[in-house]
Amino acid sequence: MNVFTQKELEKYADTLIWGLKTARPSIKKYDSVLVRCDLEGLPLGEVLHAKLIKQKYNVVFRLMPTPGIERSFYAYSDEAQRKFIAPGDKELYAGLGGNIYIHAPKSLTHLKDIDTKRQSEVALTRKTLRDIMTKNEEKGLFGWTLCTYPTEELAKNAKLSLKAYSRQIAKACFLNEKDPAKKWTWLYKESVDIKKWLKSLKIEQLLLKSKSMDLKVKIGDMRKFSGISGHNIPSFEIYTSPDCRYTEGVYFSNLPSFRGGNYVEGIRLEFKKGRAVKISAKKGEDYVKKILATDKGASMVGEISLTDKRFSKIDKFMADTLFDENFGGKNGNCHLAVGFSFSGAYAGDVAKMNKKIKEKLGFNYSSIHWDLVNTEDKIVKAVLKSGKTITIYEKGMFKR
């Protein structure tokens, strides 16, 4: 079944290229671009590949492992195999100018009974490759974006028909617009105004409150707000990476989450002195606890984010973090990510960032990054450095 028309595929591919060029404006002809594509997303992958070639990029195209291949690897491999990095991978990642991932899962739960320790070993090993890309991104030498292609598995778990699921993606990514990239450029400019406003407030701390959560997050020194930067298609969130050492209170994720082949629901985290000290979930609690014990930073905050419902057209649970973390609906959303911080939240010269600076400023370091979404009606207040407290987000909208 063709979930998108040829014209929509062309628009989707153009939007991804817009995202890559926005994420890294300095990308140029003959730079190497890695395209990673799940098998189910090949119709979009083929169109994207052709467009990148026509624009004179050197494309490295890789199909991702199928659920069967991924499961057999985790089920039968030993520790040495899970810590293996293929010859040439470090050189490839070091030389990349861009990376585009087309997420199109055929299964969301094929790893549900696999020991999470095995997944953590792989994540820790492959962190070295991500660190290479992060360092090059900080130098302006690398950019990335990603998207989701609709599959029967995603639609089933979102309790939607494949057609309805596909229409949600088309609506969210502006594929029904004559020129989606032009719409994204408008939204990018709107987000710049919001980020400038937030910066001008000189925020010391955020207070997030809903019926199920009451959380205090210290923004930290040398921070800025980022988002709608081309890195995710779609993306409506405005986020920062706070000082992970001072988070206090309760956070609750009311949207379910699929991660590592597992389904979890109703995650509740209680933070003290920056760390989640009480962890519970209505479903998948054991898995959550194991993932948050992956390394020292896994139980600390790497990101805090708000989405304005006036921008996001996503109004259905999508069983996909990319869309769920950008949920608009009636109340907008906030999401908190446990795990690594984004250097893009640093207000100084990112090219000069190093481990010492990150530690001094409270940027979190971890091999995981897990976005946990709350769509409840909430009020977000900002405690300013001046001592004044103001409301910055209410009824799903920024209050500028």
Image (tube, rainbow, N blue to C red):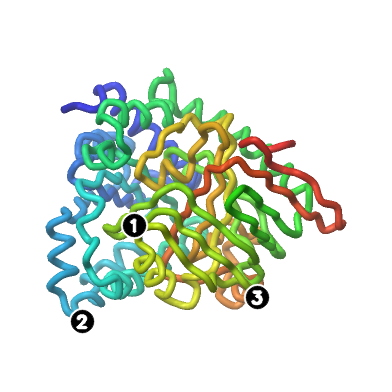
Query: How many angstroms separate mark 2 from mark 3 (CA)?
Result: 34 Å
In the drawing, does residue 92 fall left or right of residue 17? left
Up/down of 174 relative to 46, above or below: above
Can residue 111 be seen? Answer: yes
Q: In which quarter of the image is the N terminus?
A: top left
SS under mark 1 = strand
Identify residue type, mark 1.
Arg
- Image quadrant assignment for residue 151: top left
Front in this rendered view, residue 31 or 230: 230
Mark 1 → mark 3, Cα distance in angstroms: 31 Å
Amino acid type shown at disc 3? Lys
Q: What residue type is labelled 2?
A: Ala
Q: Name the residue under label 1.
A: 259
Q: Where does label 3 land, which residue?
A: 360
Q: Residue at x 42, y 31 (%)?
A: 173
Tell me the tag on residue 80: 2
Residue at 38% across, 38% down: 16
Q: Give the distance between the C-alpha atoms of the residues marked 1 and 2, in whole angstroms.
A: 24 Å
